[in-house]
């Protein structure tokens, strides 16, 4: 367990391609008492809770996207639009990213550990990595990633391929902070890699 000895937590970024296993890595961190901010889940909350975001989506993409039995966003329909139209994706990101960063900063200062984690598939293109004192980049063979995505999202091969291609710019940038590469293949144990990273983080806070 990483205990707190300063006022603001240090931030471990977690990123990787779609289906690489970011969520599994984050769940292990949470079980080891390191809080995780899941930017994807938080963004989904913005689509449902923020009047600004709902108004924006309706104005640019149509009110039908919220025409569901419980008036929640039709995420699959929006994803289909965004992953096939880079201009539309950029338009939404310019709204969502600043709101998400503000949400993260407010969350971060409430935590009571030396380290917290920030999980984001677009850690680098969104510049979320600038919050980070260290970054984990999770890798897995493409075949395994495709299997995971198909099982998780019940998506077609064409949809999966299009979404992966839309993530071409997500790879790590040159940074001054440590970058840990994690192999999340089916045949490589993940837990020992997580523990090794935590031990290294603890040494950095001594």
Image (cartoon, rainbow, N blue to C red):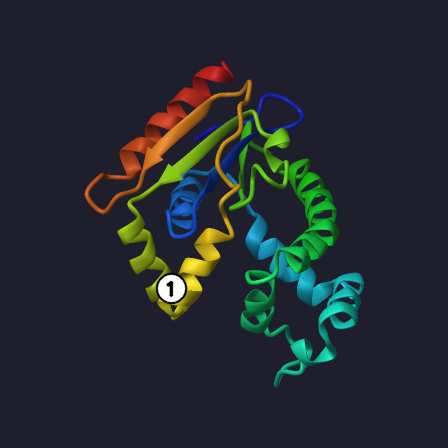
Q: Residue at x 68, y 35 (%)?
A: 109
Nearest the viewer among 69 and 164 is 164
Give the x, y percent position of residue 185. Answer: 26, 43
- Residue that carries the numbered disc 1 in the rendered image: 152
Q: Quadrant of residue 136?
A: top left
For residue 181, side relative to residue 100 (left or right): left
The quarter in which the N terminus is drawn is top left
For residue 143, side relative to residue 138 (left or right): left
Graded by Cα atoms within 10 Å as few (under 14), some (14 to 19) or many (20 or more), the crowding at tag 1 reads few
- Judged from this view, the residue extending furthest toward the top is 206
Q: Residue at x 61, y 61 (%)?
A: 85
Give the x, y percent position of residue 93. Answer: 68, 52
Q: Quadrant of residue 182?
A: top left
Give the x, y percent position of residue 194. Answer: 35, 34
Nearest the viewer among 50 and 123 is 123
Give the x, y percent position of residue 193. Answer: 31, 32
Which secondary structure, mark 1? helix
């Amino acid at each position: 367990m990483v205990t707190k000895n300063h006022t603001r937590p240090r931030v471990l970024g977690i990123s990787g391609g779609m289906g690489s296993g970011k969520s599994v890595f984050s769940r292990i961190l949470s079980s080891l008492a390191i809080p995780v901010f899941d930017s994807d889940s938080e963004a989904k909350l913005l689509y449902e809770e923020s009047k600004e975001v709902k108004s924006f989506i309706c104005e640019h993409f149509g009110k039908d996207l919220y025409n569901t039995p419980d008036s929640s966003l039709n995420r699959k329909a929006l994803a289909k639009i965004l992953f096939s139209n880079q201009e539309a994706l950029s338009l939404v990101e310019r709204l969502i990213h600043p709101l998400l960063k503000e949400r993260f900063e407010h969350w971060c200062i409430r935590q009571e550990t030396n380290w917290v984690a920030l999980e984001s598939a677009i850690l680098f293109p969104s510049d979320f990595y600038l919050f980070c004192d260290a970054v984990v980049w999770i890798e897995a063979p493409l075949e395994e990633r495709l299997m995971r995505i198909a099982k998780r999202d019940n998506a077609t091969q064409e949809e999966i391929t299009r979404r992966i291609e839309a993530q071409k710019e997500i790879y790590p940038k040159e940074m001054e902070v440590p970058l840990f590469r994690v192999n999340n293949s089916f045949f490589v144990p993940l837990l020992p890699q997580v523990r090794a990273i935590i031990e290294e983080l603890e040494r950095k806070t001594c």
